[in-house]
Amino acid sequence: MFCPLCGKQNPDQALVCFGCGKDLPKFASPPPPRPGTVNLNPNAPHARGKLLVVPRGAQLPFTCLKCGQPATRWVPIKHAWLNPALYLLILFGLIGIIIVAVLTKRMDLQTPLCEAHAGIRRQRIIAGAVLLLACVPVGILVGNLVPGDAGAGWGMLVGIVLFIGGIVALSLRNLLRPERIDDFGITLRGVHSSVLAQLGASQPITPTMTPIA
């Protein structure tokens, strides 16, 4: 039995995890597939080329998705995805923005990360928030410090650069980029190759038909 919280292997009869001390589920969970094997359960997390497919409600192994090292924590990450072609709706103004917001697919994912990558995510969130909060006051300050009519232009430029930097930092905070989100689950890019090898590719089981004599 593999603990769903820390990933440690325990005897099938164990009631408490030997690794983290938490209660174990009543039924044993099968071990993850060996690297390079085929995962016959399409409803489990699996590799699709260089992408990771995570069905809704599926449990990821307790391995950092970014580096393949043992994870130290579960990080709840909110992912959002929209078909790129639908971004053109923004050109229609407020109505288009509302439609985009409605059509955007979202999924919360408990993501295993090591301490280093959890720290990188934290730093990007802080940096993005600081840049967004600073774009207006710093822009005004620069505008007042630069003499003449050029001050307003320089202040606006600095404010725009800080604003864009904040948006970029926040957009990179999730470390993994969703390629698609639908009713089945989420497809992620940027997962370490060792994690993809550990999970294996999915191959749904199809019934075989026996010819009638």
Image (tube, rainbow, N blue to C red):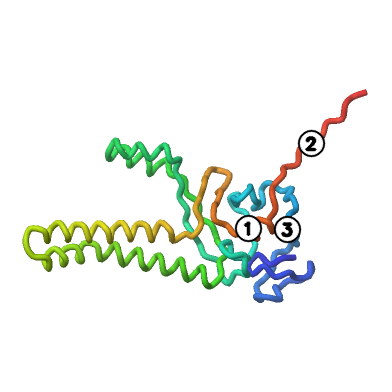
Task: Say which amino acid is labelled 2.
Answer: Pro
Q: Which residue is mark 2?
A: 207
Task: Say which amino acid is labelled 1.
Answer: Ser
Whether residue 168 sits left or right of residue 45 in the image: it is left
Q: Where is the C terminus found, in terms of image quarters?
A: top right
Mark 2 residue element: loop
Q: Which residue is mark 3?
A: 35
Structural crowding at the residue carrying mark 1, measured as other residues with C-alpha within 10 Å and reported as few (<14), some (14–19) or many (≥20): some
On screen, 37 above or below 16?
A: above
Residue 13, given in percent of the width and then of the height, sits at 79, 69
**Mark earlier in primary sequence (3, 1):** 3
Whether residue 90 sits left or right of residue 123 in the image: it is left
Q: CA distance from mark 3 to mark 2?
A: 26 Å
Looking at this view, is 119 or 99 the one in front? 119
Structural crowding at the residue carrying mark 2, measured as other residues with C-alpha within 10 Å and reported as few (<14), some (14–19) or many (≥20): few
Whether residue 52 sits left or right of residue 13 in the image: it is left
Q: Are marks 3 and 1 in contact (CB under 8 Å)?
A: no
**Mark earlier in primary sequence (2, 1):** 1
Count all numbered tags in the image, as a single digit.
Answer: 3
Q: Is residue 194 at least partly visible in the picture?
A: yes
Mark 3 residue element: loop
Q: Which residue is mark 1?
A: 193
Q: Residue furthest right?
A: 213
**Mark earlier in primary sequence (3, 2):** 3
